[in-house]
Amino acid sequence: MQIGKKQSGWLAAACPLVAACSSSTQEISVREIVEDLSTDEMLGRDNESTGAALARTFLVRELDRFAEPIAPEATGEARYEQEFDSGTNLLAIIPGTDLADEYIIIGAHYDGVGNDC
């Protein structure tokens, strides 16, 4: 699957996998996701920026369509978050269907380089 030159990090690896594994009735368009994350509105998605927060909200909304949160006892975006000193990653689980004891773990390191490059 060709995504284009604007793909980044986890999207390049995970989106084709997610599209193949998803039981969602809505088709996941990798190109649309990458285009949404690379819009000027995302401000480069630099760590702890407004753009990173927008990207996180967008990705959590996408993850809710096909995956389970890593911390289901939490609420909102925190269900998927792995926080660290200078940012936040997202983690989700796709449980097996035919192999119910097996899982796919998705990690999203979604920050960019900002818009000063």
Image (cartoon, helix red, strand yellow):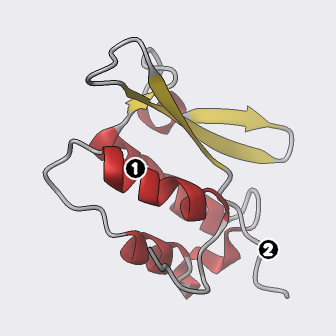
- Quadrant into which the C terminus falls: bottom right
Q: What is the quadrant of residue 84 in the picture?
A: top right
- Mark 1 vs mark 2, foreground winner is 1
For disc 2, the marked residue is: 113
Identify the residue at horizontal 46%, vertical 58% (top origin). Answer: 15
Quadrant of the frame with the N terminus: bottom left
- Residue for badge 1: 18
Left or right of 90? Residue 93 is left
Q: Is residue 58 visible?
A: no
Query: Which amino acid type is shown beneath numbered disc 1?
Result: Val
Give the Cα distance between marks 1 and 2. 25 Å
In the image, residue 53 sits, relative to residue 93, either above or below, namely: below
Residue at the location (44% across, 14% down)?
A: 73
Instruction: Give whichever of 115, 69 is nearer the camera.
Output: 69
Q: Position of residue 28 (x, y in %)?
A: 29, 62
| Residue 26 falls left or right of residue 76 | left
Q: Amino acid at mark 2?
A: Val
Mark 1 surroundings within 10 Å by alpha-carbon count, few (fewer than 14), some (14 through 19), many (20 or more) = some
